[in-house]
Amino acid sequence: MTLFATPQAQGDADAAYVVVPHGLSPMLLVCDHAANAVPAALSGLGLTAAQLDDHIAWDIGAAALTRALAERLDATAVLAGYSRLLIDCNRAPDSRDLVAAVSDGIAVPANSGLTPAERTSRLDLYHAPYHQKIEALLSDPARPVPVSAIVSIHSFTPHLNGHSRPWQLGILFDEDDRLAQEIYAQCRSEDGFVVGLNQPYAPSDGVYYTLTRHAVSRNLAAVMLEVRNDLLHSSAAIEHEAERLAGWLAQALRTLPNGASRVAH
């Protein structure tokens, strides 16, 4: 039987949610892979609870890190409400990776043989609302401070496909490197900190969709930050990383035109 995405039942998560909605920072935070939720009607996509709790289903620690950064920077943040295995909000609608049938060697039963109608339904119910929420915030004439930068927060597993990934932080950027280079300069000054530029992914891997759609199209400064998820293993660890990243982001924002007077950190 082919499972079909249905409208949210009572108790299902929202497709997107906002924290610090009235933030005064000109920086907007987004978290594409914040959750591992699956609509009840899809029975966990045929996966076990342990599999849905693993990195294949979400970016472990990224939601808590995004919330902590939003509070420190007084920055509005938009977080996706469902697992990337249901649909990946950081992929274009026509991407072959939009709905993964296999992730890190694990088959996702409910994603096998998905029909065009089922794919469209998931786009309409879980992908589009997330991007519409971002669009609404960017175009809201009532915002006290216009958005001048978008920062996408992710985490990555230390090991993938048999390969170790040594970076503590990956800084991803496309042609606009204004924020990336400033953050890179700051984190390189910290002894022993291992950072990678366009590692462990790069825009050429198709992972820059949200920033291309919302930042690049508006000529807003943009950067994606990938934190290795073993650094986000506890509330204390997340607070530590948030404090460090908030300082780097605040300084980077000050380098943009009119950025200094709007940074809360």
Image (tube, grey):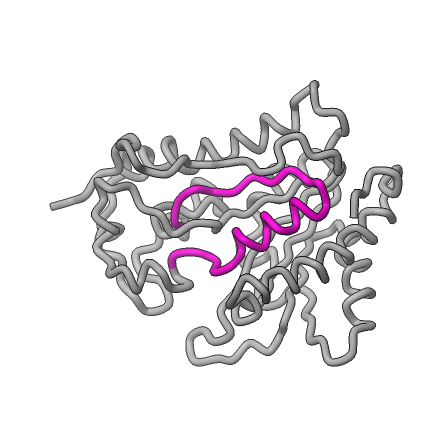
Q: Considering depth in this image, is 18 or 46 the residue closer to the camera?
A: 18
Q: Considering depth in this image, is 250 or 56 the residue closer to the camera?
A: 250
Q: On the rendered structure, is 36 left or right of 21?
A: left
For the point 26% across and 37% down, which residue is it? 5
Looking at this view, name the residue that lies furthest to the left.
1
Q: Considering depth in this image, is 153 or 70 the residue closer to the camera?
A: 70
Instruction: Give residue 134's position: percent from left, percent from top.
Output: 58, 33
Q: Considering depth in this image, is 58 or 113 the residue closer to the camera?
A: 58
For the point 59% across and 29% down, which residue is it? 135
Can residue 215 be found in the magenta stretch?
Answer: no
Q: Quadrant of residue 195?
A: bottom right
Instruction: Give residue 162's position: percent from left, percent from top.
Output: 43, 80
For the point 33% across and 58% down, which residue is it? 52
Magenta span covers which residues?
Answer: 57-83
22 vs 47: above or below:
above
Instruction: Give residue 150's position: percent from left, percent from top.
Output: 68, 43
Q: On the rendered structure, is 110 left or right of 18?
A: left
Q: Quadrant of residue 203?
A: bottom right
Instruction: Give residue 129's position: percent from left, percent from top.
Output: 46, 31
For the point 56% across and 56% down, which residue is it? 154
Can residue 77 be found in the magenta stretch?
Answer: yes
Q: On the rendered structure, is 191 left or right of 158?
A: right
Q: How many badges with numbers are in the image?
A: 0
Looking at this view, name the residue that lies furthest to the front.
236
